[in-house]
Amino acid sequence: MNFREVRRTKDKVRKGLGPVAALFALVLLGGCDWLFDLDTTPPTCYITSPADSAAVNGIVPMAASATDSGGVQRVDFYVDGGWVGSADAAPYSVSWDASGLAEQSWHALSCVAYDLAGNKGESDTIAVRIASAGQTSVFHGELSVPAQGRASVSFDAKVGDTLAGDVQVALGSPLSKFLWLDRDNYQKFTANQAYTALFQQENFSQLSLRQAVASEGKFYLVFVNGAGAVVKCWARFVLE
């Protein structure tokens, strides 16, 4: 059967069969490639790491989430509009070498996802800052603290480091408590035992912290919500 005969047959099928029967008949006659012409919806994607406004340095892992009803072909990563790398399978991630960039300079990160039909979806742009020498990001982003619950951030630090940061409630009631705990006291806290905090503040909508680390080990920042609804807050902490 030549091309014209196939085309005439397809036209007859479209006129003589119902929608579902016609779909399967056309697949048999013409293959599956034409089905992609029906897909005009671009995939969605967004940068999941680093967080917006985070302080970064050195080799920076970049990660993205991408979804599409027909499948994602690949995700391209960009910094300041320049291509950094691509990933063709989840979890979508690449490494960005930020070494040598000016301290405190800001850079725009984004990604573009492509689906199997050739549609592309672009993410929103986030901004990150190159950390000062010796500065390490502990956490930067939004936290959702469940009603009558808590959220925690863990990090490693050594003697001579300084923990600095801010917390701002963005939605909901003031947080009932913020704690900076070492490993032993965090375990006591989660077991509802008496504990000693390295830093503690209660009933606040914003706070600032700058305090030296007295010992080496793993530490925890704990955000406690005693209210009956979720509280959302922005937090930024670095080690200097």
Image: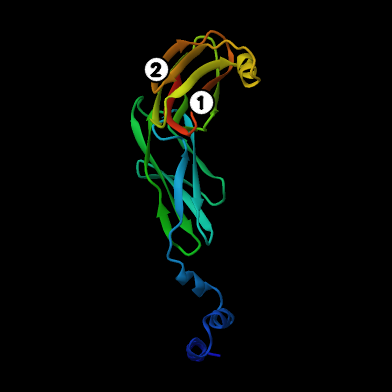
Q: Residue at x 35, y 44 (%)?
A: 81
Q: In the rendered view, tell whether residue 116 sits above or below residue 29.
A: above
Residue assigned mark 2? 208
Residue assigned mark 1? 226
Q: Residue at x 58, y 12 (%)?
A: 216
Q: Residue at x 40, y 35 (%)?
A: 52
In the image: residue 189, left or right of residue 34: right
Which dot marks residue 12? none
Locate residue 125, reporting x and y percent: 37, 43
How far separated are the C-alphas under marks 2 and 1? 21 Å
Q: Earlier in the sequence, mark 2 or mark 1?
A: 2
Quadrant of image for the C terminus: top left
Q: Residue at x 53, y 26 (%)?
A: 153
Between 39 and 116, the residue placed more toward the observer is: 39
Instruction: Please tell me how crowded label 2 is: few (under 14), some (14-19), or many (20+) other residues with Cα within 10 Å.
Output: few
* Residues at marks 2 and 1 touching, judged by CB atoms closer than 8 Å: no
Between 198 and 164, the residue placed more toward the observer is: 198
Give amino acid for label 2: Ser
Give amino acid for label 1: Gly
